[in-house]
Amino acid sequence: MTRRREPVQERSRATVEGILAAARTVLAARGYPGASTNRIAEAAGVGPGTLYRYFPDKDAIVDRVVADVSDEMESRVLQAFLASLRAEDTVRANLEALLDALSADAALLRTLAEHVPGTLEARRAGFARRVDQMLAGVLLTEHGNGDRPVPAMAWMLVRTVEHVTVRWVVEAPDIPRATLLDELTAMIGGYLAPGLSHRAAPHEPPPDEGRGRHGGSDSPTTPEVPCSPDTATDTP
């Protein structure tokens, strides 16, 4: 019995994978509005009836595509994150890994971000929380004995980098990849610079502020108030 069911299950899995692969292609090429179930079925080489046997509607297909794309991006980012810990420039290596992961399916990511932002955002939020924990562990080795709020630092860094990199891929601005990497690396490096306190330093006046014009008095000089014509007194 088991042996007779296995080929059917394997064929079913292959059919589902073919439908999902076709959906990714059609979504990237035609966008969400143009990705009808008929077009997806045609691209997968199956009839509409076969498609509906596994998916009740287009949204069910898209939900599965979002899940698969998110899992793939997470896997690539996590692997690169761990590998980059040995890199000389860890910050830039992580940014490059993130851009590589996001750019691998840039057209598909644009479609999903524009037409199913809620589903995609929910997946990204869960992934961001996991990255928070990993980054916090790394930051603890650098700032664990100081007065920096490590959990807050990790949260801010992950959200900032994620937003900038995702929008760079989705919007495709006229900013070269190298420029983006340079500026993000500089920004993060400055924020993580040793000795940088999260508290604003108290304002200190310039050395001669509050002293007389010739430096002879520590008390501020009372400015002269010009007399108005109504209060001026003529000198006899």
Image (spheres, rainbow, N blue to C red):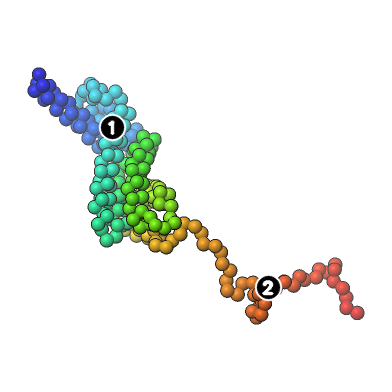
Residue 27 to residue 146: above or below: above
Marks 2 and 1 close (CB-CB < 8 Å): no
Task: Work out whether residue 151 or residue 231 is closer to the camera in this orientation and state it.
Answer: 151
Residue 29: percent from left, percent from top: 28, 39
| Distance (Cα) linking label 2 and label 1 | 73 Å
Q: Is residue 201 left or right of residue 62?
A: right
Please state the total of marks drawn on the protein image: 2
Asked whether the viewer can see residue 45, the reply is no
Of callouts 2 and 1, the N-terminal one: 1
Please give the name of the residue rendered at 25% of the width and 41% of the height, measured from the top-left corner.
72
Q: Residues within 10 Å of mark 1 (few under 14, many from 20)?
A: some
Q: Callout 2, which amino acid?
A: Ser
Q: Is residue 20 left or right of residue 118?
A: left
Please give the name of the residue rendered at 33% of the width and 50% of the height, measured from the top-left corner.
137
Please give the name of the residue rendered at 37% of the width and 48% of the height, measured from the top-left corner.
158
Q: Answer with the quarter of the image where residue 234 lies.
A: bottom right
Q: Answer with the quarter of the image where residue 145 lies.
A: bottom left
Which residue position is annotated with label 2? 219
